[in-house]
Amino acid sequence: MKLLLPIALTLLVSPLNAYAEVEFYNNTCNKLFKDEGNKVCKEAVKGDAKASYAMARLFGDPQSGPLVNLDYAFYWHLKLSRKIVKEGLTEPAYVSTLYNTGVLYTDGLGTKKDIGKGFYWFNQAAQRGDALAMVRLAIAYENGAGTQKNDTESVKWLTKAVELNDPQAKVAMAKRLIEAKGVKKDNTKAIQYLKDAAAQNLPQASFILGNAYLTGAVVDKDFNQAKEWYAKSCQLNMLLACKRYFDLDTNAQGLEDFLNAKPLK
């Protein structure tokens, strides 16, 4: 997400330890910040959306280092998300805030885990065009996580995310096409989706392609193609792909075993 308000916040004291509940008041701002940071904090307390976004980003962004505080991050994400829905704010960074709120609830970060509330916020973000939220909705409907299982809805949201060129959606759709799960089986289309996602530097896509060419499960076996796809995935820091590439590159004696391997999952 892009910062809507470029600021350098100066913290007076280290963030407090985790709380079950957090509230921010002007006194809280005085305890935590000085100068511009104090001003932004107080604007956020008054309900300013840009300032609230800055606070949510400050406490939730890993790049903030010691300033990260997930309780504070959740407080500002939820506060801003409610405002976004109430006032119909549509800027992309605000839509991403809705998605992030879903993640915080679903993973229990800064708040008690609640996949039902996570689903609600994913839905809010997806309705506003966020592709990542659409993928999470598709997974939720597929597994009945926070909602009832509904494969039709799952495929619908996955299709929307694919149309938005989301690489994770392409991998998920490729798996459905291979397994004929909710869609008509189409290995050729599945491989193309995987290659598209790999071109977008998603390491999982390259890894799955390596498996496919190694085992011949969906395409003709091709040892060199398998090595190339594992290498690409390895370059994107997927350690299992690095191991597979190393095995193929060094274990000439075991080549026949690899080529005759059962499909890898």
Image (tube, grey):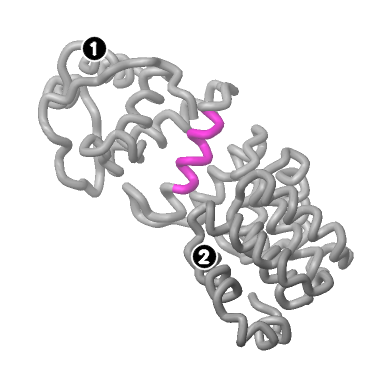
Q: Which SS type dominates the magenta stretch? A: helix
Number of other residues with Cα within 10 Å of mark 2, as a class: few under 14, some 14 to 19, many 20 or more: many
Q: Position of residue 203 (x, y in %)?
A: 58, 55
Q: Quadrant of residue 228?
A: bottom right
User: Which image quarter: residue 174?
Assistant: bottom right
SS for callout 2: helix
User: Residue 46, image x and y in percent?
Assistant: 32, 16
**Label 2 or label 1, whichever comes before in sequence order:** 1
Residue in front for this viewpoint, 225 or 180:
225
Residue carrying label 1:
36
- Under mark 1, the amino acid is Glu
Residue drawn at x 55%, y 46% is 120
Name the mark nearer the viewer: 2 or 1. 2
Which residue is at 16% across, 45% downward? 17
User: Is disc 1 surrounded by few (<14), some (14 to 19) or many (20+) residues within 10 Å?
Assistant: few
Q: Quarter of the image holding residue 139?
A: bottom right
Region of the chain picked out in magenta, as a range:
94-103
Residue that numbered label 2 is attached to: 242
